[in-house]
Image (cartoon, rainbow, N blue to C red):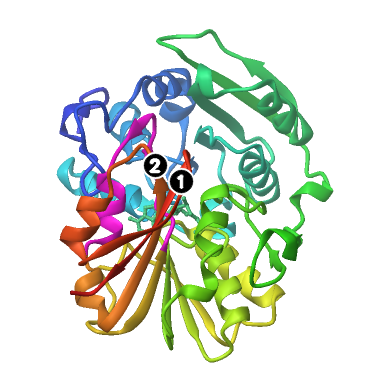
């Protein structure tokens, strides 16, 4: 491919949520690629890494626009990673762009690291600590974000690990931070996260110790929707096999395993950080022998008739868009996966109309509690 000859129009979000308001490449991707152009053109094969690339636009743009070769990418979300892989095939970049788990293999020897800034400062801290630990000492980080989601705290995080952080001009509501002068510091914030106790006063089944990696939903705190769902812990059906669907930190998985000594719980999440956190949380509560965690898209990989109880606090948002597609996608295979008499319990924002969807996907659905904010439902297999 000729340098500069790359059609972003061929990129798609599929199989991630699609809607007219959502795009596969945004102004931040383009600004980061333009800012890093000279570095990318001068890079040798294997020197470019991309962190948080949503659907592969940065990695594929680095290759297609600026000739970067052997680009390594990390994307925490499985659906984003799958979209990136499909986009690589669609644009002929197979073999030039590789998706890897977060860690040494991803970052070793990198000299240019492109970043879609994560929302959570803790996640940015993890990324910056790993960059200075594993990358080349002359690494340059070009990190971009939507200005409305950026904070001065991001500059502070980068300054912990880099001598110099330059703030670029804004363009189309995006901005770039450029960090150079890596300092391999021993920052206590880069140590593995410690368990934090959510006290029994907040959880009917007793206290739970929670471990959460940087980007995980709600971190180590108890989300108020999750609290509403766990308030019914004693009313869930008797169950041997339980699924914590969209497990995040794994707080639900461990709470159920602690309260039900005969239950085996499988946490499912599309996020690698969530899967690791769920296992760490189970370990911290002494229930890791009965809690498993897997990175999957909803229930798609679960065997038929393999669960008695599915618990789910689904996400409401993809970026700024509120979408029922997310809950529907996650719960879609419930009927196939549940055993006869099985139940799905879910919690959702009371303004959303999930009830019809639940009736259709699963079966008779009862409202078990409702506040102005959250509704908790139980659906029984018809
Ligand atoms: C609202 S959070 C709930 C997290 C956790 N259960 C809790 O209560 O704190 C929803 C979770 O669903 C996960 N998720 C989003 N889409 C998913 C999918 N298609 N398959 C599996 N998990 C998904 C997100 O990564 C997130 O961790």
Is residue 332 or residue 355 the one in the foreground? 355
Alpha-carbon neighbours of circle 1 within 10 Å: few (<14), some, or many (≥20)?
some
Q: Is residue 382 visible?
A: yes
Image quarter for ligand 1 equals bottom left
Residue 278 screen position, x and y as percent: 56, 67
Is residue 326 or residue 122 the one in the foreground? 326
- Splitting the image into 4 quarters, where does residue 62 fall? top left
Q: Is residue 154 above or below residue 249?
A: above
Callout 1 touching callout 2 (CB < 8 Å): yes
Residue 9 screen position, x and y as percent: 17, 28
Counting the numbered discs, the total is 2
Pick out the residue farthest to the bottom.
262
The residue identified by callout 1 is 374
Q: Which residues are magenta?
A: 312-332
Q: Residue at x 25, y 26 (%)?
A: 21
Is residue 275 or residue 228 the one in the foreground? 228
The answer to whether residue 338 is left or right of residue 284 is: left
Q: Is residue 244 above or below residue 289?
A: above
Alpha-carbon neighbours of circle 2 within 10 Å: few (<14), some, or many (≥20)?
some
- Splitting the image into 4 quarters, where does residue 353 fall? top left
The residue identified by callout 2 is 350
Determine if the magenta segment contains residue 19: no
């Amino acid at each position: 491919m000729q340098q500069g000859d790359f059609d972003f129009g061929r990129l798609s979000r599929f199989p991630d949520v699609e809607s007219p308001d959502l795009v596969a490449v945004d102004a931040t991707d383009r600004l980061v690629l333009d800012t890093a152009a000279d570095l990318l053109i001068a890079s040798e094969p294997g020197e470019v890494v991309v962190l948080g690339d949503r659907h592969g636009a940065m990695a594929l743009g680095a290759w297609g626009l600026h000739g970067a070769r052997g680009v390594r990418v990390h994307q925490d979300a499985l659906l984003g990673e799958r979209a990136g892989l499909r986009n690589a095939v669609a644009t002929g970049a197979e073999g030039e762009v590789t998706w890897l788990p977060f860690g040494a293999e991803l970052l070793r020897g990198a000299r240019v690291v492109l970043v879609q800034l994560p929302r959570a400062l803790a996640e940015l801290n993890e990324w910056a600590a790993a960059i200075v630990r594993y990358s080349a000492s002359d690494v340059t980080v070009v990190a971009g974000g939507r200005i409305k989601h950026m904070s001065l705290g991001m500059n502070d995080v980068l300054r912990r690990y880099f001598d110099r952080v330059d703030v670029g001009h804004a363009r189309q509501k995006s901005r770039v931070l450029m960090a150079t002068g890596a300092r391999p510091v021993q920052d206590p914030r880069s140590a593995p996260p410690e368990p934090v106790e959510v006290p029994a006063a907040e959880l009917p089944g007793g206290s739970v110790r929670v471990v959460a990696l940087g980007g995980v939903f709600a971190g180590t705190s108890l989300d108020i929707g999750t609290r509403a769902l766990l308030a019914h812990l004693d009313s869930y059906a008797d169950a041997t096999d339980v699924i914590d669907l969209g497990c995040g930190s794994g707080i639900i998985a461990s709470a159920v395993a602690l309260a039900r000594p005969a239950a085996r719980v499988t946490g499912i999440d599309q996020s690698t950080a969530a899967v690791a956190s769920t296992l760490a949380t189970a370990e911290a509560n002494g229930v890791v022998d009965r809690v498993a965690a897997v990175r999957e898209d909803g229930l798609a990989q679960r065997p038929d008739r393999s669960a008695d109880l599915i618990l789910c606090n689904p996400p409401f948002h993809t970026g700024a868009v509120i979408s029922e597609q997310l809950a529907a996608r996650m719960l879609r295979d419930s009927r196939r996966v549940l055993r006869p008499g099985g139940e799905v319990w879910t919690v959702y924002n009371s303004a959303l109309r999930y009830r019809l969807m639940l009736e259709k996907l699963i079966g008779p659905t009862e409202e078990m509690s409702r506040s102005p904010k959250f509704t908790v439902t139980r659906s029984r297999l018809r």
